[in-house]
Image: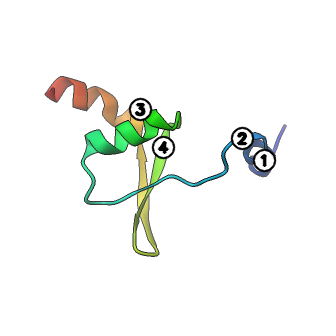
Amino acid sequence: MKTVAELLREKANHAVVTVSPDSSVFDAIKTMADRSIGAGVVVEGDVVLGMVAGRDNAGKVVLQD
């Protein structure tokens, strides 16, 4: 079984996608969709606050229009 490091080395783009805690859920999901990723790291300055996942929120955005 591969390690996480091995999987990351195989990715075309190694950039970590970050999202501001002030971003709307829609904007966060759009950023993830534009970059074909499933999650983003929520940061404020140099502090990691958490993660946001498209799977968790996409349906809510659609339902709320």
Q: Which mark is residue 39?
A: 4
Q: Which circle's residue, 4 or 3, is located before the other in the chain?
A: 4
Q: Which circle's residue, 3 or 1, is located before the other in the chain?
A: 1
Instruction: Check disc 4: other Cα within 10 Å, few if <14, some if 14-19, many if 20+.
Output: many
- Residue appearing at x 41%, y 42% in the figure: 31
Element class at badge 2:
loop
Q: Which circle's residue, 3 or 2, is located before the other in the chain?
A: 2
Measure the alpha-carbon separation of dots 3 and 1. 24 Å
Instruction: Check disc 1: other Cα within 10 Å, few if <14, some if 14-19, many if 20+.
Output: few
Q: Amino acid at mark 4?
A: Ala
Instruction: Answer whether labels 3 and 1 touch (C-beta < 8 Å).
Output: no
Element class at badge 4:
strand
Q: Which tag is nearer the camera, tag 2 or tag 4?
A: 2
Vertical placement of residue 43 versus 1, above or below: below
Tell me the quarter of the picture where residue 30 sits.
Answer: top left
Q: Which residue is mark 3?
A: 55
Q: Could you say where residue 16 lies in the image, as x and y percent from the top left? A: 57, 54
Measure the alpha-carbon separation of dots 4 and 3. 8 Å
Q: Could you say where residue 52 lies in the image, as x and y percent from the top left? A: 40, 47
